[in-house]
Image (cartoon, rainbow, N blue to C red):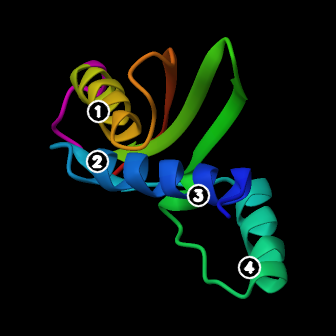
Amino acid sequence: MVTRAQDDRRLVEAVAAAVGEVPGVAFLRPGLAERLRAAASARRVNSTPTASASAVRVRGASGDGITLEVFVVVHRGHRALDVVRAVREAAVRGARTTLSARVPVRVSVTVSGIV
């Protein structure tokens, strides 16, 4: 039996993988709260969370759709706006690999740094 937590984890991993391939993305960056949450959940389920997966949050997974929050660091020399648009498209594409086509997906992208 697949649990909601397992579904969310697959969704997050698919989105993180898709976003990680976007030109201009240096890496996905989790915040401190996400790192602590990921470390605590790793102890409970005996798995190792990746930093990129913890940089993607799923909100409101219900009948009215989901919202994905993605945190990225952009390579210097790339326009942040162009990277954000590409990240948004990649996140939706990644989400569609695990979700029904009828589920609305909203994406919020935060650029947390430039390197």
Q: Which residue is mark 2?
A: 18
Query: Which circle's residue, 1 or 4, is located before the other in the chain?
Result: 4
Query: Which circle's residue, 2 or 4, is located before the other in the chain?
Result: 2
Q: Which residue is mark 4?
A: 42
Query: Which circle's residue, 1 or 2, is located before the other in the chain?
Result: 2
As measured in the structure, the alpha-carbon distance from the residue carrying label 3 to the one carrying label 2 is 14 Å
Residue type at the position of mark 2 = Ala
Q: Residue at x 28, y 47 (%)?
A: 18
**Whether residue 75 is visible:** no
Q: Which residues are magenta?
A: 76-81
As measured in the structure, the alpha-carbon distance from the residue carrying label 1 to the one carrying label 3 is 16 Å
Kindly state the secondary structure of the residue where label 2 is placed: helix
The 10 Å Cα crowd at callout 3, few under 14, some 14 to 19, many 20 or more, is some
- Given residues 81 and 56, the one toward you in this image is 56
Q: Residue at x 65, y 84 (%)?
A: 47
Q: Which residue is mark 3?
A: 9
As measured in the structure, the alpha-carbon distance from the residue carrying label 2 to the one carrying label 4 is 23 Å
